[in-house]
Image (tube, helix red, strand yellow):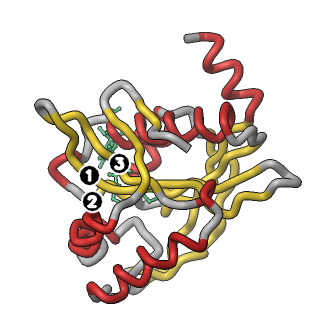
């Protein structure tokens, strides 16, 4: 797989040099608020995670998100598909923009749109879904902009910050992607 290029972003393979940034971001409570991780992560944890990527199917390895800055590229987070099912032709997506100075600039929506294109037009999937905490309003709004549709609610499925909260399931079907792209 080669680098995926969007209008302002690109998605490339994760490199060892990215690990220090990821380590900082997965320990930032504001970033992990919307993520499944909740315990402190050591540099060794992060390096082990990086080494474990080599044994994963290439289609489900995370991708580094970079934005165009001046004449070069700046790393702002990572994203990717996982739980890929080749019979159902489905997968789930995840995203973390760890650089908080780049939130609310549309990079999340652009990343998810690029991943959707990759899932439908390269991996030939039929259904792409994600899970998001109901309180993560920024994420929900960003996913809606990328074309994700709310399809269900897992009631009190997560325990965070001393209380149970709902988890939303959002998805895009290939038929919806085809309609969306034809309209553009
Ligand atoms: C969630 C995340 C991917 C979104 O990416 P982003 O680039 O910040 O989001 P976007 O700019 O694409 O869209 C954000 C939208 O939410 C809106 N928004 C932000 N905070 C809001 C709030 N409190 N109430 C209502 N809308 C809000 C923004 O105005 C924007 O909508 P608009 O373009 O219509 O104005 C990113 O912030 C992130 O990675 N956060 C940390 C990790 C995380 O939560 N990951 C998701 C796990 S499911």
Q: Residue at x 58, y 55 (%)?
A: 81
Q: Which residue is mark 1?
A: 76
Sooner in the amino-acid sequence: mark 2 or mark 3: 3
Question: Along the line of sight, which residue is nearer the eye, 77 or 172?
Answer: 77
Measured in 3D between alpha carbons, the distance from the residue under mark 2 to the one under mark 3, in whole angstroms, is: 10 Å
Disc 3 to disc 1: CB gap under 8 Å = yes
Q: Residue at x 80, y 48 (%)?
A: 89
Horizontal side of residue 50 vs 101, given as left or right: right
Q: Quadrant of the C terminus?
A: top right
Question: Along the line of sight, which residue is nearer the eye, 52 or 27?
Answer: 52
Mark 2 sits near ligand 1, with its Cβ under 8 Å away: yes
Q: Residue furthest left?
A: 70
Horizontal side of residue 157 vs 179, given as left or right: left
Q: Position of residue 99 (x, y in %)?
A: 21, 55
Q: Residue at x 82, y 54 (%)?
A: 86
Q: Position of residue 69 (x, y in %)?
A: 16, 35
Q: Is residue 169 above or below residue 113?
A: below
Viewer-nearest of discs 2 and 1: 1
Measured in 3D between alpha carbons, the distance from the residue under mark 3 to the one under mark 1, in whole angstroms, is: 6 Å
Question: Along the line of sight, which residue is nearer the eye, 5 or 94?
Answer: 5
Measured in 3D between alpha carbons, the distance from the residue under mark 2 to the one under mark 1, in whole angstroms, is: 6 Å
Horizontal side of residue 149 vs 8, given as left or right: right
Viewer-nearest of discs 2 and 3: 3
Q: Residue at x 30, y 73 (%)?
A: 26
Q: Is residue 21 above or below residue 40?
A: above
Q: Which residue is mark 2?
A: 98
Disc 2 to disc 1: CB gap under 8 Å = yes
- Disc number placed over residue 65 in the picture, else none: 3
Sooner in the amino-acid sequence: mark 3 or mark 1: 3
Q: Quadrant of residue 42?
A: bottom left
């Amino acid at each position: 797989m080669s680098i995926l290029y969007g209008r302002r972003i690109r998605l490339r393979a994760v490199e060892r040099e990215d690990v220090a940034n990821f380590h900082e971001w997965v320990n930032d409570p504001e970033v992990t608020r919307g993520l499944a991780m909740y315990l402190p992560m050591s540099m060794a944890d992060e390096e082990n995670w990086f080494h474990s990527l080599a044994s994963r199917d290439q289609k489900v390895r995370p991708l580094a998100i970079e934005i165009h800055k001046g004449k070069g590229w700046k790393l702002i987070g990572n994203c990717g598909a996982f739980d890929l099912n080749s019979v159902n032709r489905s997968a789930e997506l995840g995203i973390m923009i760890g650089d908080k100075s780049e939130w609310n600039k549309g990079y999340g929506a652009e990343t998810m749109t690029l991943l959707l294109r990759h899932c439908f037009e390269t991996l030939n999937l039929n259904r792409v879904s994600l899970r998001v905490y109901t309180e993560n309003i920024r994420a929900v709004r960003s996913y809606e902009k990328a074309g994700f549709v709310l399809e269900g609610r897992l009631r009190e499925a997560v325990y965070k910050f001393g209380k149970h909260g709902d988890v939303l399931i959002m998805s895009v079907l290939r038929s919806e992607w085809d309609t969306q792209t034809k309209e553009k």
